[in-house]
Image (spheres, helix red, strand yellow):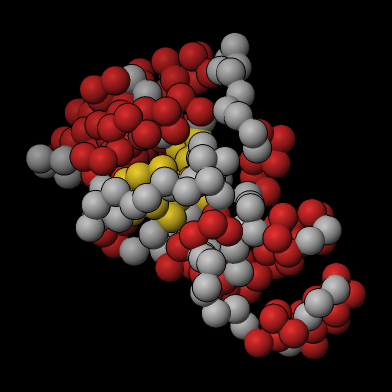
Amino acid sequence: MHEHDTERDAARPPRHRDPVYAAVTRIAAFALAPVAAAVTPGRARHTACRWALAARFPAECLDGLQPAARAAFEAARTRALWEHGVLLGLTSGYRDRATQTALYLAEVRRCGSVAEARRWALPPEESRHVAGTAMDVRPTEGARWLERHGALHSLYRVYDNEWWHFEYRPDGPPARLPHPGAASRGTRRPEWFRQATSMTEIDLTCSAA
């Protein structure tokens, strides 16, 4: 999605400051663990991890994710930090229909065609972000860790062209697809969108909706 426009084809190598951020966050988690143990007995690591990552990624928001999906993601990032020293942040999780529609139409305008846009974004009725079960993660090291270990938490990478996009799939791993649009062939699109055959028509229809 748009948060990763400069990183579409491949994950970027780690930045020089990333190991510093990771080390500071781990130290913070260890320092916070005794307080977390007092506040949430039996869940000290989970709470300390949550506090430390909130300081590292202050703009992230887990609100709106389905409860099971959120629990799985929080369990995964706790394990990543404490067992492997890897930070796992959330770039984008739940999106309401209006936000997803705006992102999708912006992608259509940017790409110049619906077919190309659907390689990177889906309309709201097809998006698992709207369903609250999709997560765009960061940094690249965190995404690599989640691709290796996420199955233990029913979290799977779904698309070849989006290294950051993972979905909560408690029924088991989904088929890996080349891009988002490949998942929804035959899915019924909204009448207003199926009738819009040009960029001008799409813009006018959206404005009137």
- Which residue occupies the extreme left position in the image? 42
Q: Which residue occupies the foreground of this view, 19 or 134?
A: 134
Residue 30 in the image: above or below residue 117 = above
Q: Residue at the location (30% across, 55% down)?
A: 169
Residue 25 position within the rendered picture, expressed as x and y whole percent measured from the top left: 41, 24
Q: Total number of numbered labels?
A: 0
Question: Splitting the image into 4 quarters, where does residue 107 fall?
Answer: bottom right
- Which residue occupies the extreme right position in the image? 200
Q: Residue at the location (30% across, 38% down)?
A: 150
Q: Which residue occupies the foreground of this view, 194 or 8?
A: 194
Would residue 1 be found to the left or right of residue 166 on screen?
right
Q: Residue at the location (46% across, 63% down)?
A: 128
Would residue 112 be found to the left or right of residue 180 on screen?
right
Residue 20 position within the rendered picture, expressed as x and y whole percent measured from the top left: 50, 14
> Is residue 98 among what the camera can see?
yes
Question: Splitting the image into 4 quarters, where does residue 171 fall?
Answer: bottom left
Q: Residue at the location (37% across, 28% down)?
A: 145
Residue 6 position within the rendered picture, expressed as x and y whole percent measured from the top left: 71, 35
Residue 158 in the image: above or below residue 196 = above
Would residue 85 be found to the left or right of residue 44 on screen?
right
- Which residue occupies the extreme front position in the image? 186
Question: Image quadrant for the C terminus?
Answer: bottom right
Residue 3 position within the rendered picture, expressed as x and y whole percent measured from the top left: 64, 45
Would residue 57 be found to the left or right of residue 27 on screen?
right
> Is residue 72 among what the camera can see?
no
